[in-house]
Image: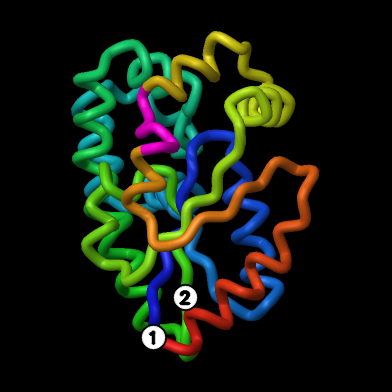
Amino acid sequence: MTRLAVIGGIGSGKSVVSRMLEIMGVPVYDCDSRAKELMVSDSFIVKELRRMFGDECYDANGELDRKYLASRIFVDARNTKRVNALVHPVVKNDFCAWAERQDCDVVAVETALLYESGMAEVVDKVLLVWTDVETAISRTMSRSGMSREQVLTRMMKQMTTDDLLLLSDYSIYNSGNNAVMPDVVELLNELKKD
């Protein structure tokens, strides 16, 4: 089995490529959505987040108060590091267990923080999905309601596209104006040859 990481900065279009892979029969593990689930369901993470930031992290129903947590995380780089150090290893182990349960030639993991999270240690190949900065900003603003400044702040905390290109085995440019499905098909054919 080949474990393919699908990476890209905020607004790059990596989720679109991941959905294409799923349509083509490749199981895709979404680190972001799974991390959100684990931040509610994993007792170790819940306990540690409460210890770090107080019981305000969770509402009366046990749901994570994402706005409160974001207000604590994104204003202090130390808090970001603390939360990442807590959540990333749990997500990595969860992905490995999930991948073992799949019965196919290729599985994919969609992640924005492959190298920062340690997930690079458990994948075989890396696909970078990328676009120009203005397209990424526009996509992110329209889907999230964030301001341009908020998007730029998040972008500044991520690895650059140039650095990611150097570290990746494959890349797909996703401007939204070009057809990427042929690139995805070509990539899968290449992976199945290996």
User: Which class describes the residues within 10 Å of circle 2: few (<14), some (14-19), or many (20+)?
Assistant: many
* Residue 51 picture quarter: top left
Q: Residue at the spot x=73%, y=25% of the render?
A: 142
Q: Residue at the spot x=47%, y=89% of the render?
A: 193
The amino acid beneath tag 2 is Val
Up the image or down, 46 lies above or below 141; here it is below
Q: Residue at the spot x=27%, y=22% of the render?
A: 54
Q: Is residue 160 left or right of residue 83?
A: right
- Point out the stretch of residues depicted in magenta: 157-162
Instruction: Say the numbered circle drawn on residue 1.
Output: 1
Residue 57 place in picture, x, y as percent: 38, 26
Q: How many marks?
A: 2
Helix, strand or loop at label 1? It is: loop
Most frequent secondary structure within the magenta stretch: loop
User: Which class describes the residues within 10 Å of circle 1: few (<14), some (14-19), or many (20+)?
Assistant: some
Pick whichever, 141 or 165, lies toward us. Answer: 165
Up the image or down, 18 lies above or below 167; here it is below
User: Between disc 1 and disc 2, whose residue precedes?
Assistant: 1
The amino acid beneath tag 1 is Met
Badge 2 is on which residue?
Answer: 107
Position of the C terminus, as image quadrant, is bottom left
Q: Is residue 149 left or right of residue 142?
A: left
